[in-house]
Image: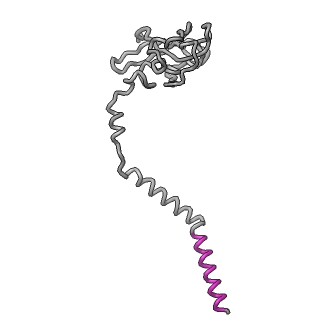
Amino acid sequence: MKLLQHWIDSLAERQVRRAAQFTGRRSALASIGKWMVAGTALPMLPFDRSGSAQAASQVAGDDPMACDYWRNCALDGFLCNCCGGSMSDCPPGAEVSKVTWVGTCHNPKDGKDYLVSYNDCCGKVACGRCLCNFNERERPGYRMGVHNDINWCMANTQTMYHCTVSAIVGVAQG
């Protein structure tokens, strides 16, 4: 009987010590150490880089349908060229806003800065495609002519916003 009690006590003690090893502070530090070593080894594993090479081969800001196109540097809204219009013309059924905001955008191809007038197209429900929100050189809301967070359709009869066009109005003088 004593032998059985001694064996049960030894077994219980081993199990409790093993549980303490895996759930105590030392085991937590050991687990963190393992994850840190695994984290430093992970970037060394091979992976497919062909997609990033293709993206790098394209010139940044070269696609007029993309938000990073140079002319969209201060645009906040849906691109009209994704909504049935063009970069400078509203889609059919929408009219250009009577008021506008202006941004100064840098064209990387010719190295010049251009004044770009952003006009909202009004009279139709919001397009919902190609949303861009850039605030480069944007000024606070008290400078209305350079603030892009306003519904510029408020001066039109149809005040519903649809999309935004960007028209080059001149070259910035340095």
Q: Is residue 37 left or right of residue 143?
A: left
Seen in the picture, residue 9 relative to 166 is either above or below; the reply is below
**Rendering coords of residue 117 (x, y %):** 48, 12
Q: Which part of the image, by quadrant, shows the C terminus? A: top left
Q: Residue furthest front?
A: 93
Q: How many marks?
A: 0
Of residue 174 and residue 119, the one placed in the foreground of this image is 119
Provide the major secondary structure of the magenta segment: helix
Of residue 10 and residue 97, the one placed in the foreground of this image is 97
| Colouring scheme, one of rainbow, by chain, secondary structure, one colour | one colour
Name the residue located 42 percent from the left edge and 8 percent from the top edge: 170
Q: Which part of the image, by quadrant, shows the N terminus? A: bottom right
Give the image quarter of residue 173: top left
Give the image quarter of residue 107: top left
For the record, the magenta segment spans 2-21
Name the residue located 57 percent from the left edge and 15 percent from the top edge: 124
Name the residue located 50 percent from the left edge and 20 percent from the top edge: 75
**Rendering coords of residue 65 (x, y %):** 42, 23
Q: Would residue 56 be counted in the magenta stretch?
A: no
Give the image quarter of residue 123: top right
**Rendering coords of residue 149 (x, y %):** 58, 19
